[in-house]
Every structure is written in structure tokens, then in C-alpha cells.
């Protein structure tokens, strides 16, 4: 049975989104719990081409609300000096979500893994509880995986504070790719709509394409995205594993629309030693992140116990954080109503 991937004109986003839902026969949305997962990597403006364009988010959310769906929009960026809501506001996601953006780092569930050096992870409950998961990845390059689209967008179901730790636990590129596959399989998206409205290559050249790439299978979508930017899909180590281990079959993909590859689109260079240095870089990055810990400012704390109730590691007792137990998920940081929890250098 063929797996369809659509390449669509995105100039009229409302019309394109309405047609996409119809083509994939997603019609009965009344009161359905729908989670919309964009890519909110970090604080960034849409013109930087590293986050999902807010216009796409707004078009999808409007379609869902017009069909009486119960909508949540959210993502898990790596913790920064501001909380998730402030990141979303800067990115333009708050307005685009039409009041449906939620801090999804508050409540998590522990998931055990079977086939990876990482034995367990924590995942946002809001995503696990969704009846329909819609993924809105940005088409972009990535220094490690060459391409970062649909499969990798699912890495965002993990609270941001845990991502550096997971990078540390996956010292090689192969380890990291296999972790991404494990995470993807926890909760696969039901519909993927890739933002290819405006993208940037590895050299910083901007391409205004006004295109959307849509499908139900992330592997098929990623494969088509690779063809779209004019590279051999096997160039991506993630796609290469998917083909080798028969996680999908490229021959089963049916492309609907105009697949005219982008000319001279630059991607990161793939070298044999890159995996080795990537492992070192990931460890250094993780160590830097690990140097910071959440600390409660007692002068601001109102003793509400929100942080204590939400902590998955039970590291907060009597308004103090045990940093030996702390797993750096920063759920406490996200949930505090008084902004009394700060990221500060660890005292050795």
C-alpha cells in the first residue's frame, strides 16, 4: 500500500490546510483532544528559519477550532533565562496559537526504553494524552543528522532540560539516531505538515519557496524532504538507518505534487571523523548545561508546593532542591507561579 506525501503550494495557507485535512480524511474533530507540535527550538524570530512559521501554526489551529476540536499547542525548548511561555511569545507562537499555547514542561511521565543505552526518559503527558497529534516541523539542516524534519521533531516531546543529558548518554551519532527512533516510536504523529515556506541552507542562503510537505508517516516525509532539497536521502544517517533496518520502504512512497529539487542547496558536510567530534561536542555541551542547577529563591517563594508536586525525581523537599537527585528537567522552573526558581551555577 502506497504512503502518500503531498508537496503543496502554501501561498494560501488556510486553503492548503483545509485541503490537507480533507486529503488525509481527518474530519470528525468535534471535542477531540488535538495536540499541535511545532518546532520551538529556542528564542528566535520566524525570519531566522529555525522555528516553525507562526502563520502555519495559526492556519492549523484555526482549522481545528473551526471544527470544534479541543486544541493544545506546545513544545519543549532547552531551558533558557526565560520560561517556555516567554519563549513562545518572542517566537510569535502565543498569538498564532489563539490562546491555546500551554507550558507542556509541567507534567511528565517516565517511559522505559528497551533497545537503547538510555534506559528511561521523561515525556510530556499532554502529548501522550492527545487523541490526535499534529506535527509541524521546520525543514532545516542539522550539523549531526544533516536533515532535521519530522522524525527529529518528536524529540520535542522530552522536557527541554533533559535533552543535554540525553546527548551526553549518546556519545556517537549512531547512538543519538537510535535514541531519536525510540522517541519517535513512543508517540508517532497522526499528521505531519512541514514548514517549507521559507528555509535557509547550511551557508545561510534563504529560499522563499511557499511550500508545505504533508504526510502521515515521518519516514516518508523525511525521505521526500531530502529529495526536495536535492540530496540523496541516504546522506542523512537517520534515514540511512531507517532504510537499512526496513523501518520504511522508499518504493512505497507516492509523491503527489511537483517535486522539483532545489538547486545548489547546501547541507552540512558529512565526514567519517565527524561522528567522533560530534560525540565530544555533545559531551561538552551537556557538561556546560549540567553546570547549572535550579535554585529556589526563598524571598520569592510563596510555599505553594507546585514545584514539589511536579518534580518527577522527588528531589524537592521542604522548599529545597536536592541536586544529587535532580535530573535537570526544569519542570519546577516551568511550573513556579512566582518565578522563584532560577538556573544558577552549581556550587562544588
Image (spheres, helix red, strand yellow):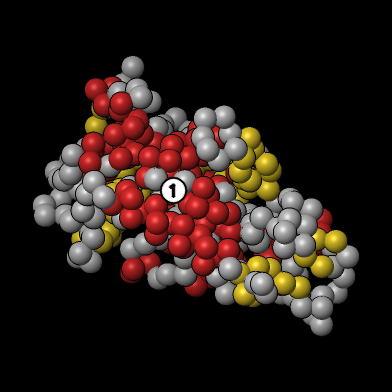
- Quarter of the image where the N terminus is located: top left
Q: Is residue 316 left or right of residue 27?
A: right
| Residue ID at (23%, 59%) | 201
The answer to whether 343 is drawn above or below residue 313 in the figure is below
| Residue ID at (48%, 52%) | 167
**Among all residues in the image, which is located at the extreme top?**
1
Rendered location of residue 33, percent (x, y): 63, 41
Q: Is residue 295 visible?
A: yes
| Residue ID at (34%, 39%) | 238
Q: Quadrant of residue 54?
A: bottom left
Q: Is residue 328 left or right of residue 192?
A: right
> Foreground residue, 226 or 212?
226
Rendered location of residue 183, percent (x, y): 51, 39
> Foreground residue, 181 or 304?
181
Rendered location of residue 43, percent (x, y): 47, 70
Rendered location of residue 144, percent (x, y): 33, 51
> Foreground residue, 49 or 302?
302
Residue position for label 1:
171
Q: Is residue 156 visible?
A: no
Q: Is residue 144 left or right of residue 318?
A: left
Where disc 1 sits, the SS reads loop
Amino acid at each position: 500500500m502506497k504512503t502518500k506525501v503531498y508537496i503543496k503550494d502554501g501561498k494560501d495557507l488556510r486553503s492548503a490546510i483545509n485541503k490537507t485535512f480533507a486529503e488525509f480524511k481527518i474530519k470528525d474533530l468535534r471535542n477531540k483532544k488535538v495536540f499541535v507540535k511545532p518546532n520551538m527550538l529556542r528564542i528566535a524570530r520566524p525570519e531566522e528559519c529555525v522555528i516553525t512559521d507562526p502563520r502555519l501554526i495559526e492556519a492549523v489551529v484555526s482549522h481545528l477550532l473551526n471544527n470544534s476540536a479541543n486544541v493544545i499547542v506546545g513544545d519543549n525548548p532547552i531551558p533558557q533565562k526565560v520560561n517556555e511561555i516567554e519563549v513562545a511569545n518572542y517566537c510569535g507562537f502565543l498569538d498564532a496559537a489563539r490562546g491555546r499555547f500551554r507550558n507542556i514542561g509541567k507534567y511528565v511521565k517516565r517511559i522505559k526504553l528497551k533497545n537503547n543505552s538510555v534506559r528511561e526518559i521523561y515525556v510530556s503527558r499532554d502529548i501522550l494524552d492527545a487523541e490526535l497529534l499534529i506535527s509541524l516541523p521546520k525543514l532545516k539542516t542539522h550539523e549531526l543528522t544533516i536533515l532535521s524534519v519530522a522524525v527529529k521533531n518528536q524529540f520535542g516531546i522530552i522536557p527541554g532540560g533533559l535533552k543535554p543529558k540525553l546527548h551526553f548518554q549518546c556519545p556517537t551519532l549512531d547512538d543519538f539516531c537510535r535514541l531519536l527512533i525510540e522517541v519517535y516510536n513512543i508517540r508517532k504523529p497522526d499528521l505531519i505538515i512541514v514548514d517549507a515556506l521559507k528555509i535557509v541552507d547550511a551557508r545561510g542562503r534563504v529560499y522563499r519557496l511557499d511550500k508545505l510537505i504533508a504526510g502521515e508517516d515521518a519516514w516518508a516525509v523525511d525521505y521526500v524532504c531530502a529529495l526536495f532539497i536535492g540530496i540523496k536521502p541516504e546522506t542523512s544517517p537517520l534515514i540511512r538507518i531507517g532504510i537499512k533496518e526496513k523501518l520504511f520502504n522508499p518504493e512505497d512512497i507516492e509523491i503527489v505534487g511537483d517535486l522539483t529539487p532545489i538547486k545548489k542547496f547546501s547541507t552540512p558536510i558529512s565526514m567519517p571523523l565527524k561522528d567522533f567530534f560530534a560525540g565530544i561536542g555533545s559531551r561538552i555541551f551537556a557538561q556546560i548545561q549540567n553546570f547549572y542547577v535550579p535554585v529556589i529563591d526563598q524571598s520569592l517563594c510563596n510555599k505553594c508546593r507546585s514545584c514539589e508536586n511536579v518534580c518527577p525525581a522527588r528531589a524537592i523537599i521542604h522548599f529545597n532542591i536536592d541536586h544529587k537527585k535532580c535530573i535537570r528537567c526544569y519542570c519546577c522552573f516551568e511550573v513556579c507561579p512566582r518565578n522563584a526558581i532560577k538556573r544558577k551555577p552549581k556550587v562544588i
